[in-house]
Image (cartoon, rainbow, N blue to C red):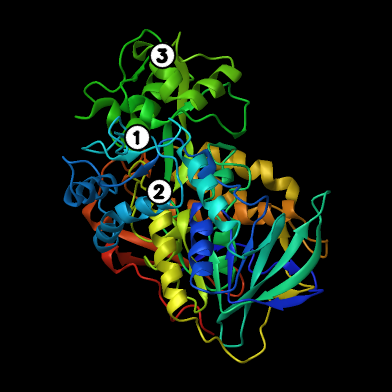
Amino acid sequence: MTASLARVVPALPLPAAGWERSTDVVVVGSGAAGLMTALALAGSGRRVAVVTKSELGDGSTRWAQGGLAAVLGADDDVALHLRDTLVAGAGLCDEAAVAALVAEAPAAIALLQQLGARLDVTADGLPALTREGGHSRDRIVHAGGDASGAEVTRTLLAALAGAGVEVLEHTVALDALRSARGEVVGVRVARVGDDGGLVDAGDLRAHAVVLATGGYGQTYASATSPAGATGDGLALALRAGAEVADVEMVQFHPTVLWQGPDVTGQQVLISEAVRGEGAVLVDGEGRRIMTGAHPLADLAPRDVVSATIAAHLTATGADHVHLDATALGAEFLERRFPGILAACRAAGRDLVTEPVPVVPGAHYTCGGVLADLDGRTGVPGLYAVGEVACTGVHGANRLASNSITEGLVVARRCAALLAAQLPSGSPAAPRPGTAGGGTVIAPAARTAIGTATSRWAGVVRTAEGLAALAGTLAAVPRTDGEALTLTAVEATAAHTVATLLATAALARAESRGCHRRADAPGTRPEWQLRLAHRIDASGHLHTRTVPRSAARPDRTQGVA
């Protein structure tokens, strides 16, 4: 494993714990993966506590428009879903993990229906299926037209309501509690006060901690992910001794509503399903952008579409291209995409009457905490599910609508594993990190981190730009001795993720999937491997390269 000069915060200045209680499993995060994990564990009789930074059910899932991918059509089969996922993943998928995902996806969706999910159906009562980019068959299940994630969230929250799960809302997980042997035996948490300060800190002791904290899209100045997607769980896992992988693989959604160069934060997403129903990308003169760029044209995989748009903008100097859905008609658009129409109209644009301006935007993070398809990381007692995890399913680029499906499948597998047997842990007293010591990134640096990441680690990257990003991040000020706040925790996590991203993207001197280098435009066979990273006690990064199918959590790293 090679060492890097890059350095991140290795320990937070934790507030002292004023209370302590025990449970079997702590689930951190309450998107689809976290809710399903908690629900399945509670159903098995395990005691579960859910910690969520905002309110229960907040997170990326409820914003998902497209749906869930699964083989349900008569003309489809798992071999085709497997092939489409591997093609989109550009040579970095773990084929065994993908095979398990596509095989178990129909059962996960059937469970949602049993729990009361109101999926869109055909006249004969079967799930209404549609197609998105990279799929060779109609296999996307949706709800409410374009409100699939909201319906998944509603279904799981309703099922969880009577399950006896302890819920700590407006509570942030700060750092893992670790035994003298390095096992994770709980987590220190604190409630977020009205002013953003952290109060009422305490320790949740547990046999296992399951991270379900989502991705790190908000490391960028603007993204489709909600404000809380700052990479907290990934940073926590690193500080606990886990490895992360594929961090350079950030998927940019091709059709984010363009509202001007100064609009930051969470952006309006226009689902790929709109193109799946026949909308097309055009330039300012109405000429199609994707014709001739890929055999699937507007339904090419997202990395191809985003890169084609980026190249067009560079060549023409334009700020944006347009998505033209006017041929679909008002009645169809109102019925199929009511949420998207409302969001665009609120921003002063109307898909019914005009081509609307769009640009690629940071959307989904394919990398994360290195874990297997049962959620196990390299640290005993620490698990990861959903977007925070890197299971090898997505490889270098996620196939559309595989994300919620993966979250549900891995959550069920992780819960089954923990229901069968909990980690024994160590009898030694836990060491909760560095109470009274440690550092954080100055909260005021958060804007600069996002601006630099967007500028130099966007759709198309260069060695020069990535080096500039790394230099900017290395110079970001740190603070000592100040009371920890939520803003400081998020700024520190964003800095950690951006540093990993710059390091990995600079090392990967090729273009593959959603990692595109203008100065290394070809895909190189010697780079058909993955980059995994960990940190040492000083916060310095250490990187190893591993074959795609051999990228398993290294359980020798997490134990002292």
Residue at 29% in and 26% down: 298
At label 1, the amino acid type is Val
Q: Earlier in the sequence, mark 2 or mark 1?
A: 2
Instruction: Judge the density around disc 3: few (<14), some (14-19), many (≥20) Cα neighbours within 10 Å.
Output: few
Which is closer to the viewer, label 3 or label 1?
A: 1
Q: Secondary structure at mark 1?
A: loop
Q: Which mark is residue 121?
A: 1
The residue under label 2 is 113
Instruction: Judge the density around disc 1: few (<14), some (14-19), many (≥20) Cα neighbours within 10 Å.
Output: some
Q: Is residue 261 left or right of residue 508?
A: right
From this view, report whether residue 147 is shown above or below residue 512. above
At label 2, the amino acid type is Gln
Residue at 43% in and 38% down: 252
Q: Quadrant of residue 237?
A: bottom right
Instruction: Judge the density around disc 2: few (<14), some (14-19), many (≥20) Cα neighbours within 10 Å.
Output: some
Q: Is residue 371 left or right of residue 81?
A: right
- Quadrant (top left, top right, bottom left, bottom right) of the N terminus: bottom left
Can the viewer see residue 261 in this picture?
yes
Q: CA distance from mark 2 to mark 3?
A: 28 Å
Q: Which mark is residue 331?
A: 3
Q: In this orientation, which residue lies closer to the viewer: 262 or 364?
A: 364
